[in-house]
Image (spheres, rainbow, N blue to C red):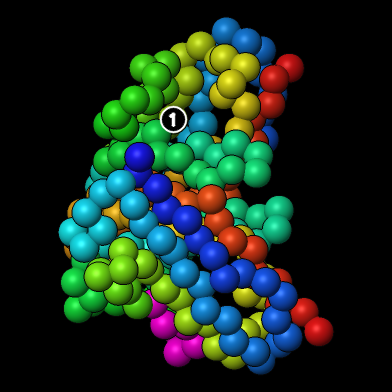
Amino acid sequence: DIQMTQSPSSLSASVGDRVTITCQASQDISNYLNWYQQKPGKAPKLLIYDASNLETGVPSRFSGSGSGTDFTFTISSLQPEDIATYYCQQYDNLSITFGQGTRLEIK
Amino acid sequence: QVQLVESGGGVVQPGGSLRLSCAASGFTFSSYGMHWVRQAPGKGLEWVAFIRYDGSNKYYADSVKGRFTISRDNSKNTLYLQMNSLRAEDTAVYYCAKDIYGDYARTFDIWGQGTMVTVSS
């Protein structure tokens, strides 16, 4: 199985900060990577698909990049409503696995 | 609006069975693949199962293979998950999620609110 290592596991930042989360795959997954946001008590929400494509309706301060084994998710200017846990998810071959999540808090 | 609503969760003893349902509305259910994804309390997300838009192909996580069965009724716009031989480690919130395509694209663009399953004696 393909393992996804997400870091950091938690992060505290101030409003307006640039925030970066990384996700590393245990093998080459091309661009078969998505990013989701999950607010407390809510279902996950798709933000980025195919590593770098912004889902319709998602604010442009969210972005993704990377290919192969190393991927980055960025919030260009953190807003209070961005407090959530963020997950990467790979879908190479026939498998589906999620990273362990990054809990983002406001400093 | 596009919506998925799960039901059927509850408390069940180890070894017991439960059937979850997911009612879809606001989109052409019969055109899209569907998934179940679960989340144990305080833990991350785990993909469980997939069914193709026409029900002709199904995939399962190793952790549930042989115990869980995914199915769908396109005439009722409803997805199901039959869970047998339940274990304590199956305790989780179960989400149904819509795939972006009819086949196994594995990108989840719509999620339900989830239904809690607790396996305990």
Name the residue type under label 1. Phe
Q: Point out residue B38 in the picture as x, y percentages from the top left corner.
A: 54, 62
The residue positioned 44% from the left and 30% from the top of the image is A73
Q: Residue furthest right?
A: B121
- State how many labels appear: 1
The residue positioned 63% from the left and 74% from the top of the image is B90
Q: Point out residue B70 in the picture as x, y percentages from the top left corner.
A: 39, 77
The N terminus of chain B lies in quadrant? top left
Q: Point out residue A35 in the picture as x, y percentages from the top left corner.
A: 42, 39
Q: Which residue is labeled 1 in the image?
A: A73
When the figure is inspected, residue A93 is found, relative to residue A107, above or below; the finding is below
Horizontal side of residue B65 vs B15, given as left or right: left
Mark yes or no: residue B80 visible. Answer: yes
When the figure is inspected, residue A14 is found, relative to residue B97, above or below; the finding is above
Q: Residue furthest top?
A: A16
**Could you say which is closer to the camera, residue B19 or residue B104?**
B19
Taking the magenta stretch, the answer to whether it contains residue A101 is no
Which structural element holds mark 1? strand
Which of the chains bears the disc numbered 1?
A
Quadrant in which residue A33 is drawn: top left
Horizontal side of residue B4 vs B39, given as left or right: left
The C terminus of chain B lies in quadrant? bottom right
The residue positioned 34% from the left and 25% from the top of the image is A57
Q: Point out residue A38 in the picture as x, y percentages from the top left corner.
A: 55, 40
Taking the magenta stretch, the answer to whether it contains residue B67 is yes
The residue positioned 65% from the left and 39% from the top of the image is A40
Q: Which residues are magenta?
A: B65-70
Quadrant in which residue A19 is drawn: top right
Horizontal side of residue B91 vs A42, given as left or right: right
